Image (cartoon, rainbow, N blue to C red):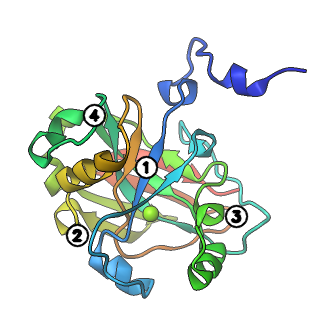
């Protein structure tokens, strides 16, 4: 039989690096006060993080197909960072050296399943880590953008602005996130860090068009099918 897991690790011409290498997608939760309030969660004392597997990647503005296991898939638009160096116990003051590019991503979430997990105090992977749940936008070198602590971004849903974020409003800024996560696990080149969603999350339906803009640049589009 063909071993598909082995095939997935081979890089073929034209394949994006994110598709070719084993990497981890680290996602920060509850990092903007207004979003924490809209989900009625508690404000955390330390950063909260979880993972998506490489099979969650949705690249090149490909469409998102609504899965049958949820009746309530939400978009969450987040600033994402591409880790560019191996690091462990990274001090906050050096965190900036460990990523080289910035973009936006959609942390697609099965809100109905997440609610059930939260109520029962269970891990919430089934609501967060399914196939295609990590849409990744076009990377922009960080040198071409304002500082990561002062980025403006927004999401249009069918042409209407539904989310607007400013990274200066994060509860825990990027240096803290990188430093904190790297206490527990080594960061590798190619890892991707989702930094949390601002307020305004909501459901998607078949036919919806999502368009996310970072500092005036269209970096990520997705059609819901
Ligand atoms: Mg999120």
Q: Residue visible at 85% across and 20% down?
A: 2
Q: Nearer the viewer, mark 2 or mark 4?
A: 4
Is 116 above or below relative to 172? below
Q: Horizontally, is 164 left or right of 152 in the view?
A: right
Structural distance between the alpha carbons of marks 3 and 4: 41 Å
Q: Earlier in the sequence, mark 3 or mark 2?
A: 2
Q: Which residue is mark 2?
A: 171
Q: Earlier in the sequence, mark 2 or mark 4?
A: 4
Contact between labelled residues 1 and 3, with CB atoms less than 8 Å apart: no
Contact between labelled residues 1 and 2, with CB atoms less than 8 Å apart: no
Q: Position of residue 181 (x, y in %)?
A: 32, 51
Contact between labelled residues 4 and 1, with CB atoms less than 8 Å apart: no
Q: Residue furthest left?
A: 93
Q: Which residue is mark 3?
A: 206
Is 147 above or below relative to 69? above
Q: Nearer the viewer, mark 3 or mark 2?
A: 2
Q: Horizontally, is 197 left or right of 20 in the view?
A: left
Q: Earlier in the sequence, mark 3 or mark 4?
A: 4
Structural distance between the alpha carbons of marks 2 and 4: 23 Å
Local packing at callout 4 (Cα closer than 10 Å; few below 14, some 14-19, many 20+) is many
* Quadrant in which ligand 1 is drawn: bottom left
Q: Horizontally, is 82 left or right of 5 in the view?
A: left
Q: Residue visible at 62% across and 76% down?
A: 117
Q: Which residue is mark 1?
A: 26
């Amino acid at each position: 039989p063909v071993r598909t897991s082995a095939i997935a690790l081979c890089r073929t011409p034209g394949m994006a690096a994110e598709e070719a290498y084993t990497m981890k997608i680290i996602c920060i939760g509850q990092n903007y006060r207004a979003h924490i309030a809209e989900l009625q969660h508690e404000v955390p004392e330390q950063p909260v993080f979880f993972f998506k597997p490489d099979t969650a990647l949705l690249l090149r503005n490909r469409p998102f197909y609504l899965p049958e296991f949820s009746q309530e898939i939400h978009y969450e638009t987040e600033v994402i960072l591409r880790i560019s160096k191996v690091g462990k116990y990274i001090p906050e003051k050096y965190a900036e050296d460990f990523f080289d590019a910035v973009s936006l991503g959609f942390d697609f979430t099965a809100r109905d399943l997440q609610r059930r997990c939260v109520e029962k105090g269970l891990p919430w992977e089934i609501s967060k880590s399914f196939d295609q749940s990590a849409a990744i936008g076009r990377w922009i070198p960080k040198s071409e953008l304002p500082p990561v602590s002062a980025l403006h971004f927004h999401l249009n849903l069918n042409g209407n602005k539904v989310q607007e974020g400013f990274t200066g409003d994060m509860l825990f800024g990027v240096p803290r996130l990188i430093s904190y996560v790297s206490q527990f696990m080594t960061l590798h080149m190619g890892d991707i860090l989702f930094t949390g969603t601002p307020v305004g999350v909501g459901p998607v339906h078949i036919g919806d068009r999502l368009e996310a803009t970072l500092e005036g640049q269209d970096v990520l589009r997705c059609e819901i099918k």
